[in-house]
Image (tube, rainbow, N blue to C red):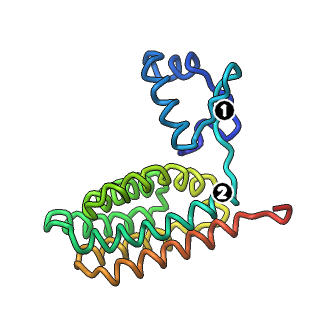
Amino acid sequence: MRLELPPGAAVSEAMLSGRLGIGRTPIREALQRLARERLVQILPRRGVIVSDINVKAQLRLLEVRREIERLVARGAARRATDEERARFAALAKAFEQAARGGDDVAFLRIDREFNELGLRAARNEFAATAMTAMAALSRRFWYLHYRQAADLPVTAKLHANIARAVARADAAAAAAASDALLDNIEAFTRATVTTDF
């Protein structure tokens, strides 16, 4: 997701095994999972290629993501436990702290926890399966382009707004905040398009 392996790069089980210091069997299993998540392409008898990042595909992904994230935000606001609500409130503060420091790595870590907590709190295994498949692709796209087109403080604030609405058990506000975030993400995605697109 942080593009340590750039789009289009060829990788192999042996190379990854050596780089990570683990056996080829877990590497093979990880590559299969990454292929299911569309992060790599396995080309029979030719190797493995890190998938390209495509703006058109990202926009199609956002169509689906918008609907599911709204569902998750509403569900989490309705079903979160008191402990989960307290964690959402803490994550809202953490988002704002990462934004103040311009810390993109911390933001990604907080975002991952926020998404996982939201899926648990929504208690909808079908939404969780769908979101899990989209999360890595979305993060990777953001990480590639955020310095040129995104505003980390704005993005963090929009995430914090969802977290606070869930913490307050306000399903309507959580859904509206989710839509505001996806509006921002869509605008950011479109802003990455070059004139030859």
Q: Which mark is residue 49?
A: 1
Amino acid tagged 2 = Ala
Residue found at the far right of this picture: 196
- Residue at which label 2 appears: 57
- Disc 1 element: strand
Under circle 2, the secondary element is helix
Rendering coords of residue 46 (x, y %): 71, 22
User: Label 1 amino acid?
Assistant: Ile
Image coordinates for residue 56, horizontal then vertical, percent? 70, 60
Q: Are marks 2 and 1 in contact (CB under 8 Å)?
A: no
Outermost residue toward the front in this view: 126
Residue at screen point 38% across, 65% down: 95
Across and down, in percent, residue 88 comes to 26, 67
Q: Quadrant of residue 61?
A: bottom right
Using the image as rendered, state which of residue 110 and residue 39 is in the foreground: 39
| Label located before the other in sequence (2 or 1) | 1
